[in-house]
């Protein structure tokens, strides 16, 4: 079959459009109600070099850890599971659920009183009084945030902190 240059260009454009548009539409609809800088995508858990991984729409792979699922009150994921993955602004997985079993998260804003160094927990002064929450990851999430800062924590289904940010007061950048 001989195609003219015009036919090749038209065919390439059509194929490119069919591949790109669903990805853009999916990305636009899946970022609702996410903290600034976070992204959400669907993936299938696969095995790569003996480890379970998920692959982002851009082709990056993230290795999974059985403990991550347990911290969220779930059973460890298996190869073939279709999952919803949430990445933070540093491309770190902050949440992952089986598709169709997405969890409900809560955000709490308050003044940071203390981040426990020996006990993985964070203490906030909120309008409802002092609150203490367990941390799933300590160093990466709390580094550089001083005591006394206004912060917003994101809690997973079991009430553990999966993300910490300076609170958005509308006056400063995130």
Image (cartoon, rainbow, N blue to C red):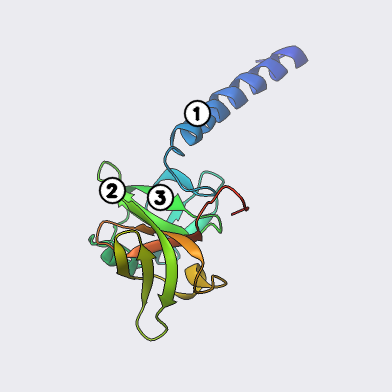
Dot 2: element: loop
Residue 156, percent from left and from top:
31, 57
Q: CA distance from mark 2 to mark 3?
A: 14 Å
Q: Residue at x 47, y 48 (%)?
A: 35
Q: Earlier in the sequence, mark 1 or mark 2?
A: 1
Q: CA distance from mark 3 to mark 1?
A: 17 Å
Q: Earlier in the sequence, mark 3 or mark 1?
A: 1
Select label 2 or label 3 by which is in front. 2
Dot 1: element: helix
Image quarter of residue 126: bottom left
Query: Does 111 sit above or below residue 36?
Result: below
Q: Which mark is residue 104?
A: 2
Q: Which mark is residue 103?
A: none
User: Mark 2 and 3 residues: CB-CB less than 8 Å, in contact?
Assistant: no
Q: Residue at x 49, y 36 (%)?
A: 27
Image quarter of residue 163: bottom left
Mark 1 = which residue? 25
| 88 sits left or right of 6 in the view | left
| 17 sits left or right of 68 in the view | right
Mark 3 = which residue? 85
């Amino acid at each position: 079959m001989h195609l003219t240059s015009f036919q090749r260009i038209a065919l390439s454009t059509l194929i490119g459009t069919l591949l790109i548009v669903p990805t853009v539409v999916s990305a636009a609809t899946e970022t609702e109600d996410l903290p600034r800088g976070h992204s959400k995508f669907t993936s299938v858990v696969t095995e790569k070099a003996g480890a379970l991984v998920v692959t982002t729409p851009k082709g990056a792979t993230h290795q999974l850890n059985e403990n991550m699922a347990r911290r969220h009150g779930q059973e460890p994921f298996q190869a073939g599971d279709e999952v919803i993955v949430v990445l933070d602004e540093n491309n770190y997985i902050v949440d992952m659920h089986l598709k169709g079993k997405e969890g409900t998260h809560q955000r709490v804003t308050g003044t940071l009183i203390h981040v426990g160094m020996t006990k993985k927990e964070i203490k906030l002064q909120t309008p409802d009084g002092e609150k203490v929450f367990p941390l799933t990851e300590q160093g990466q999430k709390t580094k550089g945030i001083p005591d006394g800062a206004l912060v917003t924590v994101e809690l997973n289904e079991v009430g553990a902190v999966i993300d910490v940010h300076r609170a958005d007061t509308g006056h400063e950048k995130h």
